[in-house]
Amino acid sequence: MFPSRRLAGLPLIASCAALLVAPSALAFDFKTVGKVPAILYATPSAKGNKLYVAPPGMPLQVMLTYGDWVKVRDMNGDVAWTQAKGLQAQRNVLVKTPGARMHAGPDEYSAVLMTADKGVVLALSDPTAVVWAHVRHRDGIDGYIKVSDIWGL
């Protein structure tokens, strides 16, 4: 066999290996609405149709950046545009499961610190969570909640 034939498959193998070792490149980017409510528009312009107002602390998934504008998706899957200056890097999540339990530790057997209704905002302490997310409620309660019970990771 000629050496060039043995090396022919290397680019494909290298590409597949790069995808396996770089999962963070495929991760979603989330931002949080700052202290002032953010107006969400149908187009990347303040002259566009106003769709709704996102309250402070609401997490939004960033899909695309276009100049000073960001195309975002909310927990319901609605897509809109907002000005990037109204978003901050602080990561928050929303409870998506009614009656979700926040535990003292990252397991089902630790004490339940609180029960949260759907839509409750929690500050995210560790954005790399896989099964249990370390979160904090605005009342100061600090604990763990199942990743499957929240949106914004």
Image (spheres, grey):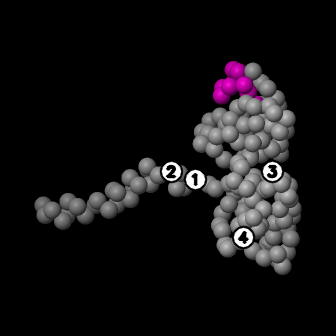
Mark 2 vs mark 4, foreground winner is: 4
Q: What amino acid is at disc 3? A: Gly
Q: Nearer the viewer, residue 39 or 20?
A: 39
Dot 2: element: helix
* Residues at marks 2 and 4, CA–CA distance in whole angstroms: 26 Å
> Residue 73, image x and y in percent?
73, 60
Q: Is residue 35 magenta?
A: no
Query: Which residue does the numbered mark 3 point to in the structure image?
Result: 57
Mark 2 vs mark 3, foreground winner is: 3
Residue that extends furthest to the bottom in the rendered view of this protein: 47
* Residues at marks 1 and 2, CA–CA distance in whole angstroms: 7 Å
> Residue 142, image x and y in percent?
75, 31
- Crowding around mark 1 (Cα neighbors within 10 Å: few <14, some 14 to 19, many 20+) is few
Q: What amino acid is at disc 4? A: Trp
Q: Earlier in the sequence, mark 3 or mark 1?
A: 1
Q: Are marks 4 and 3 in contact (CB under 8 Å)?
A: no
Magenta residues? 102-110
> Residue 88: which quarter of the image?
bottom right
Query: Which residue does the numbered mark 1 point to in the structure image?
Result: 27
Q: Earlier in the sequence, mark 2 or mark 3?
A: 2
Q: Are marks 1 and 2 in contact (CB under 8 Å)?
A: yes
Q: Residue at x 32, y 62 (%)?
A: 11
Mark 3 vs mark 1, foreground winner is: 3
The kind of secondary structure the magenta stretch mainly shows is loop
- Crowding around mark 4 (Cα neighbors within 10 Å: few <14, some 14 to 19, many 20+) is some
Residue that extends furthest to the left in the rendered view of this protein: 1
Query: Which residue does the numbered mark 4 point to in the structure image?
Result: 69
- Crowding around mark 2 (Cα neighbors within 10 Å: few <14, some 14 to 19, many 20+) is few
Query: Which residue does the numbered mark 2 point to in the structure image?
Result: 23
> Residue 48: which quarter of the image?
bottom right
The number of callouts visible is 4
Up/down of 117 relative to 109, above or below: below
